[in-house]
Every structure is written in structure tokens, then in C-alpha cells.
Image: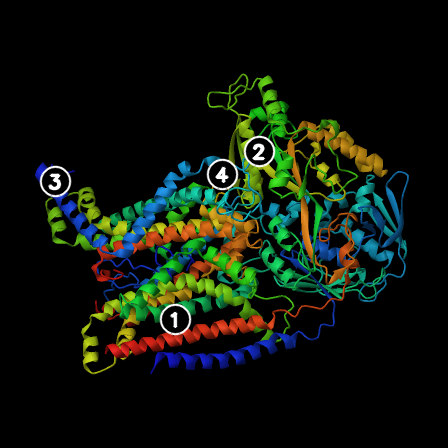
């Protein structure tokens, strides 16, 4: 905040933003798959939020479970039971909360790191920029699942470490994207003008660079969430998650450890897996649509 | 061209291809599987080999191969009683320090050389004189003074302290001197090269990492040649695959089943399921007393756990029968103390001291002792007012434990305790446990027929001298002088019944002091191809196990081929289906491509 | 790279973030060099060397942070005397000072002497040599199939953007891409191995297959079907989307109109003119894929208990087998780093813009 901004330019800017948002939304709405994805996603998020209302938390209690061991679907248990007699439907419903939470949080963390490093390294440059670029390049070439597994083994398993580890292997892509965009914006005339007028680094970054890279970042974030969810489920299934929480990956881990495949217990395997598939698909549909909005080259496809 | 005509033509071509592929497939696996002259007993395993050196092996798989390749002086009987092996008889001197064994005559090594008392003396002398081997077996070897063979059939062993049960149950596998004396370093992991030379019923001849271990039958075995010509341990990384292989007749014995796999196998033709009592207990260790030998306290266990009343209340609030029922699907027994029910003579049933599952009574106990509930429902300590909030560590890779944790946490929460379950790596858990930085932690051990080792982990003598967690001989730093006194007596008591009484008394003390809550003894779930194998002797002989036998491989030696037809592997129709699927996919692709080309042409 | 879609793109980036600088998909970000090939080469080799060195160093320290005494693992389920512990410790070289262990590790890794595995008690080099073929067989076959399938469909999808073919294939690809690999694997096992019983549940070989080459090959082929199917199903969509957008990039170009004007049929225009140009930007991708073959299928190998490097890694994590983890971490990372380097070098020859500047 180096210059005092009178109300009218700010209002103007706000109006311009509103306008551009409306334009983007119209472009998004024109894409059928994007809208389907959005509706699907909305439904899933709603279900996850409403889980405590729909199914009481006591359904997760092992001492109060009433079903038999791996019972096939019945009127009482529409999706059968797990190995201690809990309803798989209830588990899947509750599992959505953690899976989504981990996916979203990890993405936010990754994006914050990625954007911060990207904008600063692009803007500041010099030694710092070089080192930041090298580090993010390094993370980029490392095989992410290998690193994630190794880090989880070292840091121990809990929700927090899972989130941290997923964020750590995901941030570099955002950095690269943001850095490239920063460099482009940087060379535009109005930024030179701003510099000439004495705008500080902070002002340039927050007022000019960040607003310009954010839409792109958000679009790429939509595609980071599904990969974070997939990675969480893979890690949990490998047995690197916290076994004391209910997420889709941990449900599947228990299922395979307890011989659901041998017992032909398809009702135990299908629901959590399909849930992951649907969420990932919904996010991808939204992400692709968003990408098309911000990248006209792709616009018009899948309409 | 009419696309339908094209499709028809392609289908005809596909049919021709399919016939050819089918014919190929039928001839392929069938032709090779013809000469099945040797009777092989195929056992599924997933454990890698650490070393074939019988003095240094640590893993179960090499315990099994050593037990079959070599032999001991005294065998472990089918009911864990000492029976003659390479020694036909033995005698303990009055003072218990000198043992005289009569070595069986006419026994040959698998290479045809005679086995004499000289070989026995050589083997025992390795334990005494070879520093590395001695260190490796120090708990037993440290008590040996000398081993001599005055003639070919007499072997005399001298001890520093009387220790009858160690002498009778310790598996010292007798190795051939004429071979071993040539080894540059008998203590090396790769000292003995394959094929192994031993005197047992089967000798290891071949090993391929992650593929198989082959043991060939000893045709000249003094106790009669075994029924099968060879035993092959086949590697199946996952039990699921082993189960499928058993169903397909590709493997004969599978162990380590979980209840779901067990259920899937039960009632299948030609497969017999064996649900045997196991040798393992699962327990919860309570950090009530982290002190060193000189009484220095260390770690950060919750002070309330020092109160026996709290431990007793926690013990009462665990429904062990429900755990067995729900977690193990009934395949186990609620535990009282260290020694599982499979060792009938030493197992202690709890008697009058047995606590019943009663959460109300447990709550009453805590109320009486002054642990009042705070506003949040969590009890606090009388005096200091510290909340009863306990860390509860479990092994992160065991989903059964995760379920147990959930059960126990729910019960203990009803007691007004705050439980914080945490799944951590095995290594970290051990570190924390030996540093005393925990409140409650999972533990579990397999128990051998001679319980001295397990009981010895609870004596004052093995308390750590340092507080850095580097000395790991004591289970939970239990120290009770009365327990120790009885322990010394049971070690030298030659009369089995008198010894059993002493051991039960030790377990009673452990139960009442509650340094550890023993949860359950887990059954061993195994299955075998009963169309192919008959006559396997179990250990214990009634309701015992096949794969986890101790001291002698009764089951594998007594197994006889039942003479049923061997499975030929993959049936031909499988290959036809595969080939058909491939052809259909390819044909479909071609049809599709051609049709695309056609429409593209039209669009031009 | 990994089985799950990796945000950084990796072997099969489903979406190309397409920065407005106009860079094409799959192209490595490389600042244009101001002088010739030599300088370009030095810069990239230097970068890769620094990355490799970092991997080498970090591998040693990361896995040393895994808590627990390795001795406990080796003596699991059995009370051990302090003497025995000390003997084992000496045997594994754990009693030596850290700097010496580090020095041994560095010199050992550089001379291909990777030490002994804790769990197998054998040289790790041998272990890797034994398991590498299995991994290459699985991910190599899967990768080749995925690339071919993805490129074939992607070309046709992009060429007829918005057609029923396009929508059906993009939809199917996305659906399979969204499935967690391990779950798809379990379902495939459940259906094909458990219910239908026409394929083995897992593993690479049935024990007791006759030793002749033909029977062994048939047996391995039989085991290979389900894992390859799973692997290909999950990754092919990535190649499909890349090829599709690459074709879309070419579609409006003048040279295609010229070709058509010459009277070429539509598919001839596509296959002879559009495809070769569209393939250029995907070359990097193929190189990355080759690098990813080594560690390409950790999850697939684990679901199917395929005896490759990926399942060895997971097994080593749970043991934990520190020397194996160290070696595999270096190997996995090095293979991607070197593949990226190769792609970058290749790019010099493919993309004239890099040379021009």
C-alpha cells in the first residue's frame, strides 16, 4: 500500500473484476461436461457435509456394531458390512469427509507454497530466483510417489503428515506455472510503468502479479485436488495412512488386509473405490472446463 | 464395401486365428507337465531366507529348514515332551551339572558318512569355543563348560549351572564335523553351501530368492524314509495368491490365513482347513514403572498408571471374549497370561483371580479410589488433579490391532479415561517403549515350549542399567522379587508337574500385578490339499498345528501322498478364452478403424 | 512416473497447463541458451548432476531418520541377549561412526557396491539385477501399450474433435484415469481371477512350471495380462489427451489446407502431415515415460505382488530395510533425472526455436 487509492478507481477495478468473472462464468457454463462435473461435485460435497445428519457417528463404533462379519448387502445394510459388522454405506459416507478434507487441504498448502515461490522467484530473480528454480526443478524430477512413501515412513503416519507430504510433492508444478506467468506479466508495459512510478516489490507482487496469476492457479488447483485425493488413497491403501481414521483409502486398506478379495466381498471393495473415482472424475471435469475457459486454444472442445 | 460383409469376413478370419491359438495353447502347458514322477509336497511361504547356518538363523522359515535338514539329540514330542532323537537315552547327574547322552548307532549323514558322538561334541564345542556362535547363543552357550565324546556313542556335556529344561529343549542342530571343520568360518551366514549335508529327514538342496526352497528326502533316514520325495517351499508374496493356488491345486499347504480366507476355503472339495491353537499372545503393555536396576526413574509414563487399582480397572473394562469373537472371528482364546492354552501343562487358567468384564464394577473401583470425573467426563487423580489422559500406541501396519484399539478405546472411554490412540511404526514404537515414553502400547510374542525365555523377560535381572533405551531385554521393566525367586526354582526343577505349578504361580503374580494386560492367543489358520496329502501328525497331537511345529517337523515327515491326480495347471479352455478375447479385441479394433476410414472417405 | 496422475505432469500429464507463453505440451521448460549446443549441453548436464548429487546425499540422511533399531527387526519375536545384539550390529556395520558409514555409502554407490539388504542379507546390487527385468517387463509392456493406444485414439479424437468417437473415447479415458490404480487392480483380480478364475491372482510365475522356455514364457505371459491391463487402463488416457491437444494445435495450419488442395484423402492428410508434426512435442513425454519405466508401477506391482523393484521398495519401507531404500531411492530418482536430461538434449535437435535464440 504505497499509494492511497481513491474510491472511484477501486470501484472501477471491482466492476472490471465482476465483469471478467461474469465472462468466465458464461464461458464455463457453455461447457456441458464442466457443468456436469460441478453438479456432481456439489452433490458429493453436500453428502459429505451432511454425513453426520444422515448417519449417526455411532455407526462407526465397533462396540455398538450390530452386523455380522462381512455380510452381503441386505435391507438393513444396503451395502453390506465390514469385518466387525459396521455398515459399509456409513463408512463410505463418513470416509468422504476425510478424503475430501485431505485432498483440499493438501492442495491449498501446495498452491500457497507454489505460488509464493513462483511469484517471488519470478519477480525477485537473482540468486534467490536461481535457487528457487533449481529446488522446484529438483522436486519436479523426483518420482512423487516414491518421495511421498519415503517421507511418510520417516515422518510417521497421521493426517497432518499425509497432507504435508502430498503438498511437498505437488507444489513444484504450480511454481513452474506461476513463475512463467509472472515473467510474462512482468514484461508488460503497465508493470514497467508501475515500477517507474516507484511501486515497491510488495505492491507489484500483490497488486499486479498475483491477480494476474490467480485464475490460472485456481484452474490448475482444480486438477491438483483429484491427484491429491488419489495419492492419499494410494498411500492409505499401501498401509501408510493413519489406521485409526476412516477415509476411503483406509477402508480399502482394511478390506484388502481382511481378505475381502478372497471372500468375494465385492460390496466392501466397490463403494469406497467408486466414490474415489466419482470425486476425481468430477474434479477433472471441472478442471478441464476451467482450463478451457482460461486457455482459449482448448475452448469449444467437449461442448 | 458393405460394412456388414466386412465384419463377417473379419469374424471368419478371427475364428480361424482362434482355432490356431487354441490348438497352440492346449499343446503348450499340457505337454510339459507330463513326467510327474516325484511326489512333491508344496508349501506356500513368504518369508525370505536369512541364513541356512543353523547356529545363526533367526527366521521361522530357516528354523523349519534347519529342523528338517539337521537333528537334535532330544526331539520335541507331539505333545511337547522330550523324546529320543539322535540320542537314545540321557542321564542327568545328581548335581545337575553333567549330562550323559547315548548316541544312536547306525545313523548316517545324507552324504553316507557315519554320524558319531564326535560330530555331537564338535557341534557343542562350536557353541563353547567359537566366539561369534557363542555370542549368538549366549543365553544357552554361556552355561556350557565342556562337551566331550569319550567314544563313538557317548557324549558328555558339562554345565556351569543346573538347567535341565534348557538342555532338553534347546535345539542344537548337530552338524557333520567332516564338512564343517573345512569351513573357514563356521559362524558366517554363508558358511554352509547348498546342498546341505545333514542327518534329518529332508535336506535343503536348492534355493532361489523369492521363488522356492527345495528340500530332498533323505532316503537313508534312520527313522524311515519320508512319504514325499521332496518338499518345496514356494514363494507367494500374498496369502490371497496362495489361497488361489491351493484352490487350483498348485500348492498343497497354506498357512497364515485370515478368517475371510478361511471361510472361503471351508467346505471346498479336497481342501481341509485346520484351525489350531497358536503359540502367540497379543498384549497391552502399561508403562507403570520405568526404572533402571539402581532405581533411577526414566521416561514419561502417566503417574496414575502406577496405581494398581487403575490398572485393574482398565483390565476389567476389556471384554477379551468380545475381542476374540469380533476381531479374530472366534479364532482364538481370551488370554490370561504369558503361556497360551496350547501348552496345556503350563497354561494358567486364571483360577479365582480371574477378572470378569464389568465396566460398572471398574467404574466403582475408580470412584472408590478417589478418581473423580471432571466437567468433561474425564477422571482426575486424587491430590494432583491430573487428568487421566493416556497415549495408546499401536503398530501401524496391523489392521487387527487398529480394530482392537477401537474396541478398547471405546470401553476405556466409558471408564472416564481419555485415550489418544496413535498408530506408529514398529521401530518407533520399540524406541518409545524402551525409553519409557508411552502410556499404553501393543506388544506380542510367540512363546516356545520352554517358557523360561519368556518368563525371564520379566525378571529384575534384565532391568536396564541405562536410561537411553539401548538395553532391550526386559518386557516392561517388571521386577518382583517373589517372581524372581520362583523363576530360579522352576529353571532347575526336573519334575515336570512340580515345575508346571511354579510356572503357573509366576503367571498368577503377573496377572495380579498387571504390568501387562494379555488380550488373546491367536489361532493358527492353515489349510491343505487333502486329496493329495494324508496322515500328517499334528503338534499337539490333538487339535494341533501343521506348519508351526517345534523341535521336529512331525507333519512333513509323516505326510503321505494320497495318490490323487495331479492338477495339470491352467486348463486349456482358459487359454482359448484368452486367445478369443484377444482376437475379438483386435478384430473389433480393425473393424472400427476400417469403418472410420470409410466414413472419412465419404466425407471427402 | 507414478501411478496416480501427478500434478507436475510427469510421465503422463493429462492436462497441459499451457502457460500463455505459448509453450506446447510436454515441452521442458528451459531457458533458451544464448550460444551454441555446447553451452546448452553443459548447462543441462550440470543441472542434472546437481540434482543427482542432491539425491545421493538426501537418500542417506532421509532414511537414517526412520526411527527404530534395525536389530529389533532382525530379531523380531524373540528375546535377544545383549551379546547377540552387539554381534549383529557389528556384522551390519552399524557400530561404525556416521561419517564412515556415509563415506562407505557414497563410495559404494559410485562403484555399484550398494551394500547388503537387512532383510535378505544379500548384496542389493544382485537383488536389483534380479528384479529389474520383472519391472521392465510389466511397466515396459504397459507403457508401450498405453503410448500406442493413447496416440492412436488421441490422433483420431483430435482430428474429429467433438465427434461421437471423440466424446466416447475422451469420456472412457477420463473415467479410467480417475480410478485409483490399486482399486482397479483389486476389482480386476476379483472379477478375472476370483470369479472367473481365468487368470492368476498375482505374482509373476507359478512355481512348478516346467523349466523349458516355452512353458515359462506362457506362464509369465499369463500372469502379465491383468497387471498390464490395469496399468495401461490407468495411464493411457494421459497420452490420449496429449496427442489429442497436439493434433488440435496442428489442425488449423496452412500446410494441411495445402495438402488437401493437392487432392490427398483426409486420413492421408492426417497420417502423413498432421501426425508427424503433432508427434514432435510428445517426444519428451515418451522419454519421460522411458525413465518412468524403472519406477513406473509401485502400486500395480504391489496389488499384483509382482516381484519387481516397486514391490521391493514397498516391502523395504515396511521392514524397514534401510540400505535397500537408499539404493532404490537413488535408482528411481536417477532414472527420471537422466530421462529428463535426455529429453532436453533431444529437444535441441527437434525444436529449432531453442537453437535460433
Can you give x and y, in whole percent of width and height, for residue B557 in the image? Answer: 78, 59
Q: Secondary structure at mark 4?
A: helix
Position of B194 compared to B361: left or right? right
Name the chain under label 1: C
Position of B508 compared to C174: left or right? right
Q: CA distance from mark 4 to mark 1?
A: 46 Å
Which disc number belongs to residue B440?
Answer: 2
In the picture of the structure, the residue carrying the numbered disc 3 is A10
In the picture of the structure, the residue carrying the numbered disc 4 is A60
Q: CA distance from mark 2 to mark 1?
A: 56 Å
Q: Earlier in the sequence, mark 3 or mark 4?
A: 3
Q: Is residue A268 visible?
A: yes
Q: Specify whether disc 4 shares its chain with disc 1.
A: no
Q: CA distance from mark 1 to mark 3?
A: 54 Å
Q: Is residue B553 visible?
A: no
For the residue carrying disc 1, how many other residues have a C-alpha within 10 Å: few (<14), some (14-19), or many (20+)?
Answer: some
In front: A282, or B429? A282
In the picture of the structure, the residue carrying the numbered disc 1 is C148
Amino acid at each position: 500500500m504505497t499509494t492511497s487509492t481513491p474510491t472511484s478507481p477501486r470501484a472501477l477495478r471491482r466492476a472490471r473484476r465482476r465483469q471478467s468473472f461474469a465472462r468466465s462464468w458464461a464461458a464455463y457454463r457453455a461447457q456441458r461436461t464442466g457443468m456436469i462435473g460441478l453438479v456432481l461435485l456439489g452433490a458429493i460435497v453436500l453428502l459429505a457435509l451432511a454425513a453426520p445428519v444422515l448417519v449417526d457417528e455411532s455407526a462407526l463404533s465397533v462396540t455398538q456394531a450390530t452386523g455380522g462379519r462381512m455380510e452381503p448387502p441386505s435391507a438393513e445394510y444396503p451395502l453390506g458390512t465390514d469385518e466387525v459388522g459396521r455398515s459399509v454405506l456409513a463408512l463410505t459416507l463418513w470416509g468422504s469427509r476425510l478424503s475430501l478434507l485431505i485432498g483440499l487441504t493438501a492442495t491449498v498448502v501446495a498452491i500457497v507454497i507454489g505460488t509464493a515461490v513462483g511469484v517471488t522467484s519470478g519477480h525477485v530473480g537473482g540468486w534467490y530466483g536461481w535457487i528457487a528454480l533449481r529446488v522446484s526443478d529438483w522436486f519436479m524430477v523426483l518420482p512423487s510417489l516414491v518421495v511421498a512413501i519415503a517421507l511418510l515412513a520417516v515422518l510417521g503416519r497421521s493426517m497432518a503428515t499425509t497432507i504435508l507430504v502430498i503438498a511437498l510433492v505437488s507444489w513444484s508444478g504450480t511454481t513452474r506455472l506461476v513463475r512463467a506467468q509472472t515473467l510474462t506479466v512482468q514484461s508488460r508495459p503497465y508493470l514497467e510503468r508501475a515500477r517507474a512510478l516507484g511501486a515497491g516489490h510488495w505492491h507489484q507482487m500483490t497488486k499486479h502479479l498475483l491477480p494476474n496469476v490467480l485464475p490460472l492457479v485456481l484452474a490448475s488447483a482444480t486438477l491438483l485436488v483429484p491427484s491429491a485425493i488419489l495419492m492419499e488413497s494410494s498411500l492409505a491403501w499401501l498401509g501408510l495412512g493413519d489406521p485409526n481414521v476412516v477415509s476411503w483409502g483406509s477402508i480399502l486398506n482394511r478390506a484388502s488386509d481382511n481378505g475381502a478379495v478372497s471372500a468375494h466381498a465385492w460390496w466392501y471393495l466397490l463403494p469406497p473405490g467408486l466414490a474415489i473415482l466419482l470425486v476425481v472424475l468430477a474434479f477433472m471435469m471441472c478442471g478441464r472446463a476451467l482450463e478451457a475457459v482460461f486457455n482459449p486454444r482448448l475452448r469449444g472442445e467437449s461442448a | 464395401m458393405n460394412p456388414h460383409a466386412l465384419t463377417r469376413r473379419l469374424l471368419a478370419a478371427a475364428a480361424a486365428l482362434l482355432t490356431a491359438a487354441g490348438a497352440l495353447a492346449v499343446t503348450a502347458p499340457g505337454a510339459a507337465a507330463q513326467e510327474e514322477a516325484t511326489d512333491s509336497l508344496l508349501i506356500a511361504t513368504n518369508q525370505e531366507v536369512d541364513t541356512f547356518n543353523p547356529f545363526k538363523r533367526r527366521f521361522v522359515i530357516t528354523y523349519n529348514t534347519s529342523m528338517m535338514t539337521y537333528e537334535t539329540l532330544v526331539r520335541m514330542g507331539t505333545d511337547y515332551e522330550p523324546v529320543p532323537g539322535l540320542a537314545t537315552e540321557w542321564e542327568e547327574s545328581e548335581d545337575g551339572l553333567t549330562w550323559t547322552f547315548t548316541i544312536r548307532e547306525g545313523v548316517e549323514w545324507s552324504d553316507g558318512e557315519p554320524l558319531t558322538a564326535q560330530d555331537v561334541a564338535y557341534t557343542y564345542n562350536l557353541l563353547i569355543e567359537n566366539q561369534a556362535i557363542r555370542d549368538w547363543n549366549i543365553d544357552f552357550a554361556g552355561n556350557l563348560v565342556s562337551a566331550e565324546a569319550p567314544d563313538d556313542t557317548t557324549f558328555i556335556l558339562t554345565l556351569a549351572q543346573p538347567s535341565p529344561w534348557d538342555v532338553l529343549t534347546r535345539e542344537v542342530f548337530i552338524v557333520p564335523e567332516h564338512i564343517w571343520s573345512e569351513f573357514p568360518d563356521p559362524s558366517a551366514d554363508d558358511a554352509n553351501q547348498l546342498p546341505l549335508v545333514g542327518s534329518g529327514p529332508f535336506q535343503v538342496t536348492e534355493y532361489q530368492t523369492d521363488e522356492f526352497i527345495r528340500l530332498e528326502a533323505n532316503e537313508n533316514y534312520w527313522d524311515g524314509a519320508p512319504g514325499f520325495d521332496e518338499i518345496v517351499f514356494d514363494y507367494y508374496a500374498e496369502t490371497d495368491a496362495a489361497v488361489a493356488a491351493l484352490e487350483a491345486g498348485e500348492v498343497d499347504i497354506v498357512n497364515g490365513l485370515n478368517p475371510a480366507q478361511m471361510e472361503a476355503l471351508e467346505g471346498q472339495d479336497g481342501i481341509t482347513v485346520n484351525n489350531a491353537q497358536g503359540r502367540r499372545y497379543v498384549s497391552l503393555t502399561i508403562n507403570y514403572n520405568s526404572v533402571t536396576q539402581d532405581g533411577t526413574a526414566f521416561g514419561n509414563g502417566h503417574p496414575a498408571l502406577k496405581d494398581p487399582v487403575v490398572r485393574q480397572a482398565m483390565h476389567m473394562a476389556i471384554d477379551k471374549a468380545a475381542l476374540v469373537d469380533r476381531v479374530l472371528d472366534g479364532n482364538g482364546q481370551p488370554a490370561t497370561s504369558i503361556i497360551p492354552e496350547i501348552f496345556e501343562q503350563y497354561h494358567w487358567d486364571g483360577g479365582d483371580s480371574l477378572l470378569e468384564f464389568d465396566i460398572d464394577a471398574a467404574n466403582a473401583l475408580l470412584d472408590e479410589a478417589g478418581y473423580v470425573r471432571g466437567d468433561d467426563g474425564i477422571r482426575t487423580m486424587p491430590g494432583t488433579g491430573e487428568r487421566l489422559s493416556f497415549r495408546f500406541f499401536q503398530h501401524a501396519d496391523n489392521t487387527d490391532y487398529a480394530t482392537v484399539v477401537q474396541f478398547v478405546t471405546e470401553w476405556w472411554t466409558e471408564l472416564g479415561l481419555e485415550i489418544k490412540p496413535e498408530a506408529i511404526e514398529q521401530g518407533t514404537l520399540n524406541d518409545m517403549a524402551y525409553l519409557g515414553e508411552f502410556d499404553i502400547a501393543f506388544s506380542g510374542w510367540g512363546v516356545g515350549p520352554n517358557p523360561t525365555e519368556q518368563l525371564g523377560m520379566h525378571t529384575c535381572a534384565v532391568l536396564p542399567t541405562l536410561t537411553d533405551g539401548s538395553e532391550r531385554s526386559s518386557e516392561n521393566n517388571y521386577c518382583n522379587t517373589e517372581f524372581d525367586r520362583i523363576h530360579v526354582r522352576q529353571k532347575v526343577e526336573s519334575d515336570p508337574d512340580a515345575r508346571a505349578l511354579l510356572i503357573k504361580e509366576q503367571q498368577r503374580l503377573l496377572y495380579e500385578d498387571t504390568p501387562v494386560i494379555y488380550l488373546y492367543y491367536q489361532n493358527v489358520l492353515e489349510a491343505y490339499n487333502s486329496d493329495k496329502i494324508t496322515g500328517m501328525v499334528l503338534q499337539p497331537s490333538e487339535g494341533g498345528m501343521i506348519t508351526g511345529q517345534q523341535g521336529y517337523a512331525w507333519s512333513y515327515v509323516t505326510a503321505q501322498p494320497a495318490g490323487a491326480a495331479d492338477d495339470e495347471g491352467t486348463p486349456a479352455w482358459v487359454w482359448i478364452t484368452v486367445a478369443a478375447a484377444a482376437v475379438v479385441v483386435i478384430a473389433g479394433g480393425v473393424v472400427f478403424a476400417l469403418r472410420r476410414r470409410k466414413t472419412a472417405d465419404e466425407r471427402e | 512416473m507414478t501411478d496416480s496422475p501427478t500434478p507436475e505432469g510427469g510421465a503422463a500429464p493429462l492436462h497441459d497447463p499451457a502457460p500463455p507463453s505459448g509453450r506446447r505440451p510436454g515441452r521442458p521448460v528451459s531457458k533458451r541458451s544464448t550460444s551454441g549446443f555446447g553451452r546448452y549441453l553443459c548447462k543441462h548436464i550440470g543441472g542434472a548432476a546437481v540434482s543427482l548429487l542432491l539425491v545421493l546425499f538426501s537418500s542417506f540422511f532421509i532414511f537414517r531418520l526412520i526411527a527404530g533399531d534395525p536389530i529389533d527387526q532382525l530379531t523380531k519375536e524373540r528375546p535377544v541377549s545383549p551379546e547377540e545384539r552387539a554381534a549383529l550390529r557389528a556384522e551390519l556395520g552399524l557400530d561404525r561412526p556416521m561419517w564412515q558409514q556415509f563415506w562407505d555409502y557414497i563410495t559404494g554407490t559410485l562403484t555399484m557396491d550398494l551394500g547388503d539388504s537387512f532383510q535378505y542379507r544379500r548384496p542389493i546390487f544382485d537383488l536389483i539385477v534380479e528384479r529389474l527385468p520383472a519391472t521392465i517387463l510389466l511397466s515396459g509392456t504397459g507403457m508401450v501399450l498405453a503410448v500406442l493406444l493413447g496416440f492412436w485414439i488421441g490422433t483420431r479424437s483430435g482430428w474429429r474433435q467433438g465427434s461421437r468417437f471423440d466424446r466416447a473415447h475422451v469420456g472412457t479415458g477420463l473415467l479410467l484415469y480417475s480410478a485409483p490404480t490399486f482399486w482397479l487392480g483389486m476389482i480386476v483380480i476379483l472379477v478375472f481371477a476370483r470369479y472367473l478364475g481365468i487368470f492368476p491372482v498375482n505374482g509373476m510365475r507359478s512355481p512348478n512350471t516346467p523349466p523349458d522356455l516355452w512353458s515359462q514364457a506362457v506362464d509369465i505371459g499369463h500372469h502379465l495380462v491383468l497387471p498390464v491391463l490395469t496399468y495401461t487402463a490407468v495411464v493411457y488416457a494421459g497420452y490420449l489427451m496429449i496427442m489429442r491437444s497436439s493434433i488440435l494445435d496442428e489442425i488449423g495450419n496452412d500446410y494441411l489446407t495445402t495438402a488437401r488442395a493437392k487432392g490427398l484423402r483426409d486420413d492421408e492428410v492426417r497420417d502423413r502431415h498432421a501426425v508427424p508434426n503433432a508427434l514432435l512435442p510428445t517426444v519428451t513425454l515418451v522419454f519421460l515415460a522411458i525413465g518412468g519405466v524403472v519406477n513406473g508401477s509401485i502400486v500395480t506391482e504391489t496389488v499384483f505382488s509382482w516381484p519387481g523393484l516397486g514391490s521391493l521398495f514397498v516391502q523395504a519401507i515396511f521392514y524397514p530395510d534401510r540400505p535397500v531404500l537408499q539404493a532404490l531411492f537413488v535408482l528411481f530418482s536417477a532414472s527420471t533425472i537422466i530421462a529428463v536430461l535426455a529429453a532436453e538434449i533431444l529437444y535441441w535437435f527437434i525444436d529449432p526455436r531453442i537453437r535460433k535464440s
